[in-house]
Amino acid sequence: MRYMATYDLMETIRNTNQWLGASAAALGSYPAMSLFPNPAMEWMRAWGEVTERTFQRMVVKPDWNIPTIVGASGKDRIVTVEKEIEGAFGDLIHFKVAKRTSKKPRVLLVAPMSGHYATLLRSTVHSLLPDCELYVTDWHNARDIPVSAGKFDVEDYTMYLVDYLRHLGPDTHVIAVCQPAPLTLAATAYLADDEPDAQPKSLTLIGGPIDPDANATDVTDFGHRVTMGQLEEMMIQRVGFKYPGVGRMVYPGLLQLSSFMSMNSEKHSKAFSDQIARAARGDASEHDKHNNFYDEYLAVMDMTAEFYLSTVERIFKNGEIAKNEFVVNGKKIDIGKITTVAVKTVEGGNDDISAPGQCIAALDLCTGLPDAKKASHVEPGAGHYGIFAGSGWRNNIRPLVMDFIHANGGVAKKPVKKHANKNAAA
């Protein structure tokens, strides 16, 4: 019970700020206030609207809201989201395009579990759908997972990916974005040794910390500065009574969000002050640039404590992937066993989270892979977000990734259904 009060205190502070925003917006919009026009009332209303929206978005999982795509015949195709595999800690979801007749490459997009929902990749998903039969890992908010479901650490995460790849079959192409890149590489190596016929055709790693020490950032420096004891004491809390995961030890999404915001505090402060000014002038809208970005950026989820701590300790501090010393369920993973899966790395020239050099280290670890099956790309001027969702992704990176997929297997056969997800029953 030691940390439960702290978790509930954070939620209370968030709730209070949301209430203050709603109250200010309501008071500023009160019709009687129009009898005596006052710019201060307009600013109060605008502040309230922006504040209420900001703190309300922090506890809501965004919808995918994928628009229709245009088919080969020029007709709109409706996109529906279907659960392919259900699990305690995450689902494999399929974006089904209605009445699609032409065969497309089967792609597994591995979403990060680093404080945001998989919907952070919404624009990535939308850009890939016209040319791919797309599956995405949809991780669950740890606060909503009962303690009875058990633990979930980096080894469990890796085995989820192994089961997903077994299910989808060998004609799959994998794209891993950011945090899951090292674990996706490990899952591929696991299959290369344990079940070679289930390996994917290609593996694209985007902005992932394969070797965090290859080019230090604030993220890697923090991981080395603090001890695991300090990290557990500062960051881990117990879910309060309000949620199904009551009692589960987690790294709260609100703490992660505060860390994200503090890294670029001046930029975020200016963005919100500018939005308040626009709202006061009547220039803000429901889906303007600010709201489109922050509605997703502010929507955070909790991670299980064991996943967060094992990621810091094993991936960042000990560098088990970088040193090719990663162990899953007592089995040592040898990345050198990957001999047939084409591997491509993508990095952003201005990435301040996973800097250039960290991801391309994967190619050196693939000692059994011919150079002809290795590729890399650094997008000049692109930050971390831009390499999978910005103009750099749309204009340069996505075409390169699709060319890489087509060059290494292209169109897939129907998914293999014989393998069950062992973790789903956990």
Image (cartoon, rainbow, N blue to C red):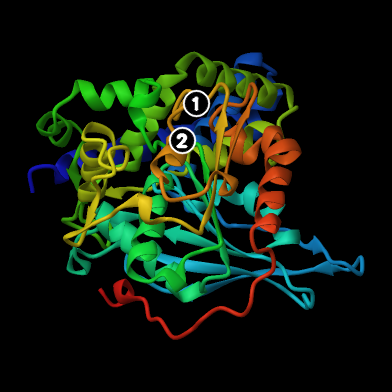
Please name whichever residue, 221 or 215, is drawn nearer the observer in this view of the structure. Answer: 215
Q: Quadrant of residue 128?
A: bottom right
Do callouts 1 and 2 mark residues in contact (Cβ within 8 Å)?
yes
In the depicted view, which residue is nearer to us: 402 or 277? Answer: 402
- Asked if residue 272 is positioned above or below residue 326 in the image, the reply reads above
Helix, strand or loop under label 2: loop
Residue drawn where x is 19% and y is 40% of the image: 236
Occupied quadrant, residue 188: bottom left
In this rendering, would 18 be left or right of 212?
Answer: right
Q: Is residue 279 visible?
A: yes
Residue that mark 1 sits on? 356
What percent of the width, then of the height, locates residue 385?
56, 34
Residue type beneath disc 2: Cys
What is the count of numbered marks? 2
Q: In the orientation shown, which residue stands out farthest toward the bottom?
A: 418
Q: Element at badge 1?
A: loop
Residue 359 marker = 2
**Depth order, front residue of 357/387:** 357
Q: Amino acid at mark 1?
A: Pro
Left or right, 72 with reference to 176: right
What residue is shown at x 18% (from left), y 43% (from top)? 237
